[in-house]
Amino acid sequence: MTVVPFILLVLAALVATIGMRRVSLWVWFAAFAAMLFVFGQYPFDMLNIAL
Amino acid sequence: MASFARALNSLALLIVCAVLLFVLYWEFMRGELPGALGLLQRAALMGVGLGMLLNVRFGASESHYGVILASALFGAWVAGRQMLGYIVTAGSFGSAIFEWHFYTWGFAGFCVTAVFATALLFMEGQFFEGVRDTRPSSAAQAAGWLFVLVALAHAVSALLQCGFESCIDAPSGYEFLRK
């Protein structure tokens, strides 16, 4: 699952380089959503002690 | 003004590529694999580079700076989470470079990037031309392909390390190659 944002970001960079700006922005949105999802899977309990 | 902003974005894109290449060097030559949160910080840095690439390739746009800022803030959030985690456990992860670990450098770097992008947003003259889908200069095209190749190398590295599963916090090797 962690690899999904990487694949999407490569795709976004590739389509930007060949001239598809809007598609690149949409693919970046998907990559960003995937990053947030992956980050949300990690525990934050430990930080409740610190904060 | 537009050419000055584009030059700054080009320079910043090259710095992002250099940092991404450096962490790859550290991973393969020093044998230090990134943890799960480290990989997310790499992805955030790739997002920062993508925003700069869009500015270089198509001209400045608020949405391109939005990509840079959102990615930088997310990267700082992840790096801050990792720093706080190690403060709580009084531990650390990986090597220190000039007495700072990678996640501490990451937090500082993402904060500087956010300030950089915010400062560039105040250069309003760069937005007058608008975005253009004309053939870019050969330098912009070369910077774009360099970024694509570096991003691809990171994607392959992440795939070898984690496969299609969620990555573990302290990896000991490339899980995908063991299967």
Image: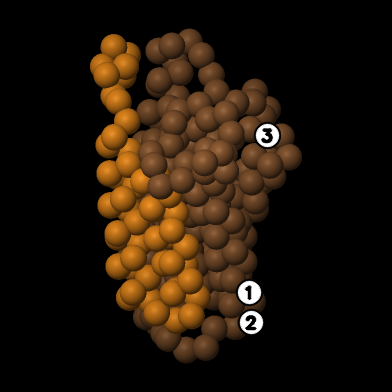
Chain colours: A orange, B brown
Residue at coordinates 68% horizontally, 27% vertically from top-left? B98
Residue at coordinates 39% horizontally, 42% vertically from top-left? B165
Disc number at residue B138? Answer: 2
Instruction: Check the image and name the residue furthest to the right.
Output: B29
SS label for mark 2: helix
Q: Does residue B90 sit above or below B74 in this rendering?
A: above
Q: Nearer the viewer, residue B21 or B69?
A: B21
Q: Where is residue B173 in the image (x, y as percent from the top left)?
A: 59, 34
Residue at coordinates 64% horizontally, 46% vertically from top-left? B24
Instruction: Check the image and name the residue furthest to the bottom.
Output: B134
Q: Where is residue B150 in the image (x, y as percent from the top left)?
A: 59, 59
Q: Is residue B125 visible?
A: no
Marks 1 & 2, CB-CB < 8 Å contact = yes
Q: Position of residue A29 (x, y in %)?
A: 30, 60
Neighbours of disc 3 within 10 Å: few (<14), some (14-19), many (20+): few
Question: Which subunit holds the residue at mark 1?
Answer: B
Q: Position of residue B40 (x, y in %)?
A: 43, 42
Which amino acid type corresponds to the residue marked 1 in the rendered image? Answer: Ala
Question: Which subunit holds the residue at mark 3?
Answer: B
Q: Which of B75 and A4 is in front in this view?
A: A4
- Residue occupied by mark 3: B31
